Image (cartoon, rainbow, N blue to C red):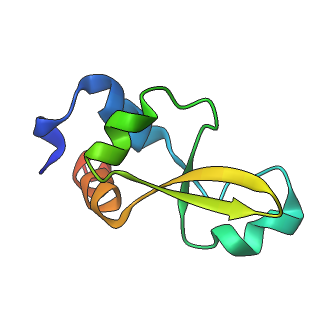
Amino acid sequence: MNATDLSSAIRNNIARARYEFTPRSVDRPALAGRYVLPSTLTGVAIWREKGLIDEVTVNGRRYYVLSDKAMRIRAQITTP
């Protein structure tokens, strides 16, 4: 799978994922090295089916982060 196999909405969300982002400083170490998607992400079932997200639970909070596959796609999208 590569970037061209995905809808523009999914590609845009992958490109906009924020590196290690959380406003909760206590959760940041658990997200180290990960690109975090909005908690309001739509179509989570589709993302799971395509293997694009991992769920990380930190201090009782769920985060959606890009999977290794999605990070490779992000590199395709964001490389000039």
Compare residues 57 and 28 and report the one nearer the observer.
Answer: 57
Compare residues 18 and 6 and report the one nearer the observer.
Answer: 6
Identified at 60% across, 37% down, the residue is 38
Tell me residue 40's x, y (percent): 62, 29
- State how many labels appear: 0
Please determine whether, in this image, residue 15 is positioned above or below residue 1. Answer: above
Image quadrant assignment for residue 20: bottom right
Identified at 37% across, 31% down, the residue is 12
Left or right of 10? Residue 13 is right
Left or right of 12? Residue 49 is left
Tell me residue 35's x, y (percent): 52, 57
Please determine whether, in this image, residue 15 is positioned above or below residue 22. Answer: above
Please determine whether, in this image, residue 37 is positioned above or below residue 24. Answer: above
Tell me residue 36's x, y (percent): 57, 51
Identified at 36% across, 46% down, the residue is 48
Left or right of 24? Residue 38 is left
Left or right of 21? Residue 6 is left
Identified at 54% across, 65% down, the residue is 34
Tell me residue 39's x, y (percent): 64, 37
Compare residues 17 and 69 and report the one nearer the observer.
Answer: 69
